[in-house]
Image (tube, coloured by chain):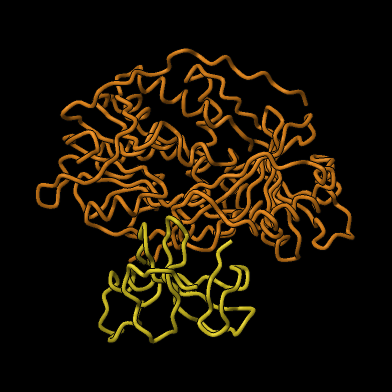
């Protein structure tokens, strides 16, 4: 069970959250100009790194707000959590988010 | 039902050769799919100058970590065709490979717990029959005839309202399947090389000409990737992207019990799937964990939900003890269907994205992937499963018939 820190509510068990996939995926600036391949990239292709990954989580049974988490996909260690609009923290991040 | 004895373990099933400087074909990944690919490259296409490279040990990844269920009751024509091809191959492989890997056609029940489940199940039975796949719709009392230990009481939280039944479905002894394929591939000259991680790709322009490995450089005319959860890691090293996400999928077994469970039961709604292994363990699976991961372990709350569902469906399991839990890493695509075919890199082919359905497909994955590698063109069975479908929109959306949430 992951222990994830909601930026508003503090550390809570994984079961309070809903996973939202990769963070920082902007909607295309000029959607009408995209080719089919570029649409496929936007809709279906996401990073799948082995290591730190910036991803979105929803605190679905808490404050019901989306936020971002940096998590290592090998160790499952939560390295940082931060509010939408805030920049992705630089790694290495000493001490995690607690 | 009586417990079948396990086959004797032969002394030597394959050689342990040093990697040669070059091969006609290098297959990356010595799991079930990689071994089946090598076997069919040799058997169907006469290509025996082949190496299968494995970073760990043979069949030690997802092949050792699945719940061994084999079935072909998928909804769409393309899926039914490839999974039914697999099932027909399973039916003849023990004799063909001269190895009794305990393929047991004990049938599979896919339970319905809601009116929508019922409608989906009845529709899928119809679709299956049109595709020549054996399928029946069973009412609750008929479900109990097939699996008497199943609780069909209407007073449970999610009562059993019926089930689809595929009698030809079943289970097999996964390790023995891998060893059987490995032995025959080895017999025909294929080099199975363990402890050999692919760290990079040798390219001449847009064409792959070999691989960099932890045991040196190996030239190859063609390279096939069959690395399941690590496919996107390899694709990145080769310079292209795959629309897959890697997720932990966990399973568990109980201690040994007398034979009590005669079939395979899957429930997508309360989410557990259970069969009884030949030795007597109850083998149970759940859905994938929601998050991306490569750690080969899952979350405890998933086990908790899966056990709650199992005990409600099978009250007789309430006193069973969990003996062992484990996780595999499954590569999940947006439409829950695999990717088998060419890549943006010439002479580099990929077989991945099987999500939670890889084991049952092993022979057909090998058959079609070998064809694709040997000819440079997809087999009719895997043509619909090309990488291009994510740009054309011709998706094969099997989230329903995949039967495992992912």
Q: Nearer the viewer, residue B232 or B98?
A: B232
Compare residues A91 and B77 and report the one nearer the observer.
Answer: A91
Quick one: B131 or B383, which is closer to the camera? B383
**Residue A22: horizontal and vertical position, in percent?**
41, 71
B34 over A64 or under it: above or below: above
Q: Is residue B318 left or right of residue B212?
A: right
Number of marks present in the image shown:
0
In this view, which residue lies farthest toward the front? A95
Query: Horizontal and vertical percent for residue B282?
Result: 71, 38
Q: Where does the N terminus of chain B fall, quadrant-wise?
A: top right
Q: Percent position (x, y) of residue B344?
A: 23, 55
Q: Please tell me the colour of chain B.
A: orange
Q: Is residue B317 left or right of residue B172?
A: right
Quarter-wise, where is residue A44 in the image?
bottom left
- Percent across and percent down for residue B299 are 59, 57
The residue located at (79%, 39%) in the rendering is B146
B269 lies above or below B279: below
User: In the shown orientation, is residue B67 left or right of residue A41?
Assistant: right
Q: Residue at x 50, y 16 (%)?
A: B98
Image chain in yellow: A
At horizontal 38% and vertical 36% (from top left) the residue drawn is B56
Quadrant location of the C terminus of chain B? bottom right
The residue positioned 54% from the left and 63% from the top of the image is B290
């Amino acid at each position: 069970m992951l222990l994830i820190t909601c930026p508003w509510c503090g550390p809570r068990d994984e079961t309070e959250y809903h996973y939202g996939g990769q963070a920082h995926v902007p909607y295309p600036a000029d959607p009408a100009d995209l080719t089919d391949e570029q649409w496929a990239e936007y809709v279906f292709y996401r990073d799948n790194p082995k290591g730190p990954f910036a991803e979105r989580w929803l605190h679905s049974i808490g404050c019901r707000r989306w936020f971002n988490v940096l998590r290592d996909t090998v160790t499952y260690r939560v390295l940082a959590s931060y509010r939408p609009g805030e920049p992705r923290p630089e790694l290495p991040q000493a001490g995690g988010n607690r | 039902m009586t417990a079948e004895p396990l086959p004797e373990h032969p002394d030597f099933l394959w050689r342990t050769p040093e990697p040669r400087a070059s091969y006609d074909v290098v297959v990356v990944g010595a799991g079930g799919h990689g071994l089946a690919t090598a076997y069919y490259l040799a058997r169907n296409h006469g290509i025996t100058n082949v190496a299968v490279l494995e970073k760990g040990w043979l069949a030690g990844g997802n092949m050792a970590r699945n719940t061994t269920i084999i079935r072909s009751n998928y909804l769409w024509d393309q899926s039914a065709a490839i999974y039914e091809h697999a099932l027909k191959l399973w039916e003849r492989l023990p004799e063909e490979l001269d190895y009794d890997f305990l393929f047991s056609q004990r049938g599979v029940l896919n339970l319905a717990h809601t009116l929508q489940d019922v409608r989906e199940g009845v529709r899928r039975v119809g679709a299956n029959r049109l595709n020549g796949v054996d399928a029946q719709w069973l009412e609750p009392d008929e479900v109990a005839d097939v699996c008497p230990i199943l609780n069909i009481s209407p007073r449970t939280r999610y009562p059993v309202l019926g089930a689809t039944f595929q009698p030809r479905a079943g289970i097999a002894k996964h390790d023995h399947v891998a060893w059987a394929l490995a032995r025959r591939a080895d017999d025909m000259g294929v080099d199975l090389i363990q402890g050999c991680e692919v760290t990079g790709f040798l390219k001449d322009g847009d064409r792959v000409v070999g691989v960099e490995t932890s045991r040196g450089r190996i030239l190859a005319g063609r390279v096939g990737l069959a690395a399941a959860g690590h496919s996107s890691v390899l694709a990145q090293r080769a310079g292209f992207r795959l629309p897959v996400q890697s997720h932990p999928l966990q399973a568990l077994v109980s201690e040994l019990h007398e034979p009590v469970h005669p079939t395979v039961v899957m429930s997508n709604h309360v989410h557990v799937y259970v069969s009884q292994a030949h030795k007597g363990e109850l083998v149970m699976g759940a859905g994938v964990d929601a998050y991306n991961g490569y750690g080969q372990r899952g979350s405890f709350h998933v086990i908790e939900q899966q056990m709650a569902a199992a005990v409600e469906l099978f009250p007789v399991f309430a006193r069973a003890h969990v003996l062992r839990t484990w996780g595999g890493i499954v590569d999940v695509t947006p439409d829950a269907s695999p990717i088998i075919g060419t890549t943006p890199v010439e002479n580099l082919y990929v077989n991945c994205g099987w999500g939670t359905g890889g084991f049952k497909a092993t022979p057909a994955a090998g058959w079609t992937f070998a064809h694709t590698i040997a000819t440079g063109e997809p087999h009719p069975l895997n043509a619909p499963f090309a990488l291009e479908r994510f740009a054309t929109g011709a998706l094969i959306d099997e989230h329903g018939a995949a039967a495992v949430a992912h």
